[in-house]
């Protein structure tokens, strides 16, 4: 009866060593052929490089620092804009108060002027002519509601000064 022989005995021990060596060479060739990376999620067992990992960490830190700097500048810009808005709001409130005071003064001057006109209708001569001129000048500065607050304040102030001149001239008579 023929003897049963193992494949190793048929091929010899050299053949087995050659196969194992070839498998090891193929594994080393595949492992060395992979690209190294600094990302621990890529590269596998032999593909990871500590130098690349440190370079990747430095790049990530630089990116984070840049993003933090941009955020800091945006916060500063926002704070500046908020301060400017508060300042503009305060100025607007101040102008609104001045405007209300001038409108109130204007109403009082207009009433005084109407009373003096009614009392001095019979006045003639140079005084009457000057009164009409001043009165026309005062009326030529209308307090327009469509102007900005600052322009309205200036217009009312000019109109009130003219009305004061008319009133003073009328009262001197």
Image: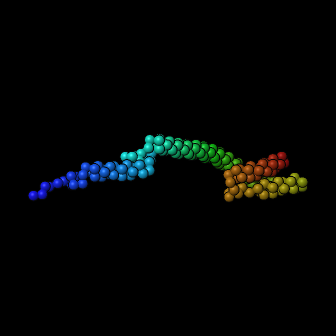
Q: Nearer the viewer, residue 62 or 34?
A: 34
**Where is residue 95 drawn, in percent x and y?**
67, 47
Q: Nearer the viewer, residue 110 or 84?
A: 84
Q: How is the image coloured?
A: rainbow
How many marks overall? 0
**Where is residue 51 drawn, in percent x and y?**
47, 41
Q: Work out which residue is located at the far right of the displayed protein and give it.
A: 126
**Where is residue 62 drawn, in percent x and y?**
52, 43
Please state if 150 lies on the left or on the right of 39 as rendered: right
Residue 49 in view:
yes
Q: Work out which residue is located at the far front of the displayed protein and give it.
A: 1
In the image, what residue occupies the spot 31% across and 51% down?
A: 18
Please state if 35 lies on the left or on the right of 98 as rendered: left
Please state if 66 lies on the left or on the right of 94 as rendered: left
In the image, what residue occupies the spot 18% across and 53% down?
A: 6
Q: Nearer the viewer, residue 68 or 59?
A: 59
Q: Nearer the viewer, residue 52 or 60?
A: 52
**Where is residue 144 drawn, in percent x and y?**
70, 57
Q: Quadrant of residue 71?
A: top right
In the image, what residue occupies the spot 68% across and 49% down?
A: 99
Residue 43 in view:
no
Q: Quadrant of residue 91?
A: top right
Q: Quadrant of the N terminus?
A: bottom left
Please state if 74 lies on the left or on the right of 162 as rendered: left
In the image, what residue occupies the spot 33% across and 52% down?
A: 22
């Amino acid at each position: 009866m023929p003897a049963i022989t193992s494949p190793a005995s048929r091929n010899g021990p050299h053949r087995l060593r050659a196969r194992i060596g070839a498998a090891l060479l193929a594994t080393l060739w595949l492992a060395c052929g992979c690209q190294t990376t600094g990302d621990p999620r890529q590269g596998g067992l032999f593909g990871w490089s500590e130098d690349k990992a440190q370079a990747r960490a430095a790049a990530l830190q630089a990116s984070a620092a840049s993003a933090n700097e941009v955020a800091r500048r945006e916060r500063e810009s926002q704070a500046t804009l908020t301060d400017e808005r508060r300042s503009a709001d305060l100025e607007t409130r101040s102008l609104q108060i001045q405007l209300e005071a001038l409108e109130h003064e204007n109403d009082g001057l207009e009433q005084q002027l109407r009373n003096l006109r009614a009392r001095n209708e019979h006045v003639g001569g140079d005084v009457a002519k000057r009164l009409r001129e001043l009165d026309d000048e005062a009326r030529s500065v209308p307090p327009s509601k469509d102007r900005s607050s600052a322009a309205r304040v200036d217009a009312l102030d000019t109109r009130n000064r003219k009305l004061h001149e008319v009133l003073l001239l009328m009262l001197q008579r």
